[in-house]
């Protein structure tokens, strides 16, 4: 093999590798960025605050539900399938009190670090765990990817299933270990930036002193600013209505 053909082969392999990396990792990441920007624009435009809770249910979830009940607002819970066993009644309580549920996989796998088959199997197992708790056969639920990461094949799978992939626009930074947590941060952002989709975590009672004050302050800030607290489906429904009326105007 001549030196020229060797160089061409090396360049072709490098080019192919870059294309694979771009499609498998970067495209889904760009999709996530675009989703976050469009969610933010929609939330600001409609003066909406959406509370989403990931990684539950846990023993703190009933406390979160009590606050939501007290203020008469609804939220969206992206449940971790592995956390449901033994807490099926909490899942049913979330739904019975008018909140929305979605899935956050079964084992909280990072979709970049597992095979697509394992990733998709974990997504299906997460849906099944919710179905078991609810004693229904719904088969699929809105999906929030753990760590906000997807690979191309899991994204295509979710699209094929017509499952909404839901990101967030404000991270509460309320998980254990974050030392500069501020329970007023979300409230300040609501007042400063307008609409937002807040990510909080109800995975452990250890962070009760973080999520409860932060939630209360955020609801108060939304009320003060005359904003509506909605579930993620309610926010997305507004987008659909807007799209329809835009088309009618053309
Ligand atoms: Zn999570």
Image: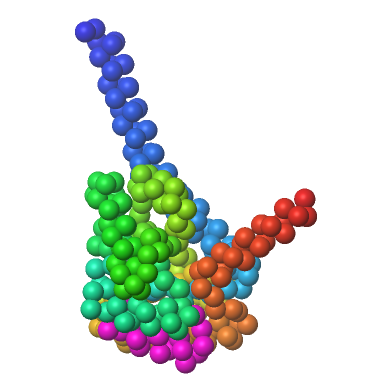
Q: Tell me which residue sits at (62%, 66%) in the image.
A: 238
Q: Taking 120 as reference, is 140 above or below it? A: below
Residue 61 falls inside the magenta stretch: yes
Residue 164 position within the rendered picture, expressed as x and y whole percent measured from the top left: 47, 58
Q: Tell me which residue sits at (60%, 68%) in the image.
A: 44
Q: Residue furthest bottom?
A: 70
Residue 187 visible to the viewer: no
**Quarter of the figure with residue 55:** bottom left
Residue 229 position within the rendered picture, expressed as x and y whole percent measured from the top left: 55, 78
Instruction: Give the total number of marks visible in the rendering.
Output: 0
Which portion, as a residue range, is magenta? 56-74
Q: Tell me which residue sits at (27%, 84%) in the image.
A: 59
Residue 243 visible to the viewer: yes
**Residue situated in front as seen by the camera: 233 or 29:** 233
Horizontal side, residue 28 vs residue 203: left or right:
right
**Residue situated in front as seen by the camera: 55 or 27:** 55
């Amino acid at each position: 093999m001549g030196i020229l053909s060797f160089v061409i082969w090396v360049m072709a392999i490098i080019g192919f590798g870059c294309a694979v990396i771009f499609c498998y990792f970067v495209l889904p990441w760009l999709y996530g960025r675009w989703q976050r920007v469009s969610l933010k624009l929609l939330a600001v435009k409609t003066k909406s605050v959406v509370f989403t809770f990931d990684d539950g249910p846990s023993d703190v979830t009933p406390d979160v539900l009590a606050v939501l009940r007290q203020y008469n607002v609804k939220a969206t819970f992206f449940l971790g399938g592995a956390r449901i066993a033994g807490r099926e009644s909490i899942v049913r309580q979330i739904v019975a009190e008018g909140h929305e549920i979605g899935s956050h996989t079964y084992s909280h796998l990072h979709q970049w670090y597992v095979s697509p088959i394992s990733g998709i199997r974990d997504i299906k197992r997460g849906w099944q765990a919710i179905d078991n708790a609810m004693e229904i056969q719904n088969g699929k639920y809105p999906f929030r990817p753990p760590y906000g990461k997807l690979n191309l094949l899991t994204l295509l799978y979710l699209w094929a299933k017509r499952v909404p992939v839901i990101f967030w626009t404000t991270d509460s930074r309320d998980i254990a270990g974050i030392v500069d947590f501020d329970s007023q941060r979300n409230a300040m952002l609501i007042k400063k930036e307008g609409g937002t989709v807040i990510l909080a975590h109800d995975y452990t009672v250890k962070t009760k002193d973080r999520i409860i004050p932060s939630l209360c302050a955020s609801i108060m800030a939304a009320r003060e600013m005359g904003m509506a607290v909605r579930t993620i489906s309610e926010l997305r429904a507004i987008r659909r209505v807007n799209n329809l009326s835009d088309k009618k105007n053309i």
